[in-house]
Amino acid sequence: MYLGTDLLAAWGLNLEFGVAGIANLAYIVVIAAGAYTYAVLTLGPTSGNGGFQQYILGFHLPFAVAVVAAALAGALVGVVIGITGLKRLRQDYQGMVMLVVSLMAATVVGADTGLFNGQAGLSLVSNPFSGSGSARGDWTYVAVVALACAVGFLVLRRFTGGPMGRTLRAMRDDEHAVAAIGRSVVKLRLVAQAVGGAFGGVSGALLVGFIGGWSPSAWGYPETLALLTAIIVGGMGNNVGVSIGTFVVYLLLLQGVQFLPQVASHPGLTEAFGWIILGATTVAFVWLRPQGVFPERRPRFGPRARSGDGGGAPSGPELSDSVGA
Amino acid sequence: MANALDEQAPPSLPGGVAVVGRGGAGGSAPLLRVEHLVKHYGGVRAVDGVSFTVAAGTITGLIGPNGAGKSTVLSVVSGFTPPTGGRIWFDGRDVTGLPMHRLARTGLVRTFQLARVFGGLTTLENLLVAAPRQRGLSPLGVLGGRFVWGAEERRLVERARALLRRFGMASKADDYARTLSGGQKRAVEIMRCMMMRPRLLLLDEPMAGLSPRLVVELEQILVELRDEGLALLVVEHELETVDRLCATVVAMAHGRVIAEGTMADLRTRREVQDSYVVG
């Protein structure tokens, strides 16, 4: 189940960062937006639980409606984040702005108890399938998440595999040149952040529906860095590679360290050790293999042309003897 | 207006042939009219009241010493940076201040001083990505997949391959653009512009860094494009190239136009000689 929600989040960020080149260091905010949206839409009114937690809405909506709303919330917040960092800023500065947005969002949500119950966060978010027996309900939930992943992967392939994906990858390489061929960089970026945000929103919704609670401590900015590591390890822009990177980073690395022997004098050391390995892995890949284990695939359009291939027509001279400009 | 290049264009490109002829197939109506263009960067007047026109189907040269403001004019005209003052008319429409991507859609397309290619895309993809109004960029196209844009893509691939053959780069179609030489990158940039079916092409020092043989080949291509109806505004330091290509040459110095005419005329003008000697 966790792998599924991590995959959805990693795919969404890969669309933004790996494909479109948007260093969205606030990606965890769209996951949080989806989680909170799902929670406050599926929870009943605050008066119904004795008022021990305060939040907005409380509509007690069905699971599917809440997940769709979470996707829309993720898309909307993704666009809002995108707007804050878009206009006339270089990409590295945009990344900094988004990191600040991430910190501000966590601070605001934590300070305002009327919105999502402040630092204490929301709890008692019901698992819609828990009524069918604990184990059976969990497996049903896993099946729903798997279905969401399958649909998400198909949508992602449509998005990254055709002209749209090609245009986003061009923008990643050179924004000025993309504008020179008649594409609006602002529009492309916002589209990428809306779709990536929708993926994050669904990820957050499915996660909170399973674990039953969500608080600011669950969505610190390091979570975005873990997703980035999964993308860098797997291969930026390669959806399959990113899936494998997610498996390695989240299951083998961050969960794997839980099996290390605990140090009694330093509780939490093993968890910290996991983050240290994560950071070291990121640095190592950026230095030694920036394209990741599974680099982006090179598209082919029919048979490879031979030198001077002109289909019978005379071809021009090879432009191969020039010096570097 | 004829398309600058279509699938029926003759693919042959005899190499090593001296480029001759500065005339054009187009008429005399200005396709581009720049009036009193001004661009300030802080207190620096990079462009200071520049006016000139470019006729359809002609190649116009923009020359001057370093710092004359040529590239700034190109940047402002192309929408890369907004003007401080003045007006720009393209095909009878006031396009002053329009951003680059909107100007490009109207057919006013530029290249850059340092060739900008999409290094993570193959050469063929670099051309495909520039085709205008692609169905695959619409929401329906994205969700519908190849069913919606597959046929269009096949036509674009054919057109791109024809261009690659014309520029003698068919064997580089599947190579990543980042692996190309400087001259090849410049050719990719020009081909990419051709995919957009432009009406006016702004070239910023297209011959910079090219071998003498490649300069001749590129000149040949530019003349062919002009003969097919494309208008070109070329910023160039190589005055021999300007002499061979351009029917009209605009000379700039210190952000102003100091002379306009044929290259032969300009060589005799004292103010042009002084600007190159004194700077």
Image (tube, coloured by chain):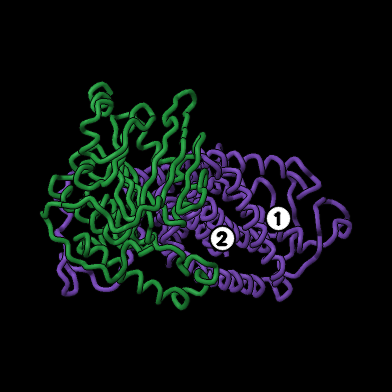
Q: Is residue A316 in sight in this rendering?
A: yes
| Residue B223, percent from left and from top | 23, 55
Three-letter residue code for mark 2: Val
1 and 2 marks in contact (CB < 8 Å): no
| Residue B271, percent from left and from top | 28, 26
Residue sitting at 19 percent across and 61 percent down?
B168
Direction from residue A116 to residue B17 in the image, left or right: left
The local secondary structure at tag 2 comes to helix
Direction from residue A215 to residue A200 in the image, left or right: left
Q: Which callout, 1 or 2, points to the residue nearer the camera?
A: 2
Q: CA distance from mark 1 to mark 2?
A: 18 Å
The local secondary structure at tag 1 comes to helix
Three-letter residue code for mark 1: Tyr
Say which residue label 2 marks: A195
Q: Is residue A134 above or below residue B106?
A: below
Direction from residue B16 to residue A294 in the image, left or right: right
Residue sitting at 37 percent across and 47 percent down?
B54
Which mark, by number, is residue A36?
Answer: 1
Q: Residues within 10 Å of mark 2 (few under 14, many from 20)?
A: many
Residue sitting at 46 percent across and 78 percent down?
B147
Residue sitting at 67 percent across and 61 percent down?
A70
1 or 2: tag closer to the N-terminus? 1
Label 1: chain?
A
**Chain represented in purple:** A
Q: Is residue A22 above or below residue A137?
A: above
**Chain represented in green:** B
Q: Is residue A232 in sight in this rendering?
A: no
In the rendered image, the residue lying farthest to the top is B278
Q: Residues within 10 Å of mark 1 (few under 14, many from 20)?
A: many
Between B64 and B15, the one lying in front of the other is B64
Between A195 and A99, the one lying in front of the other is A195
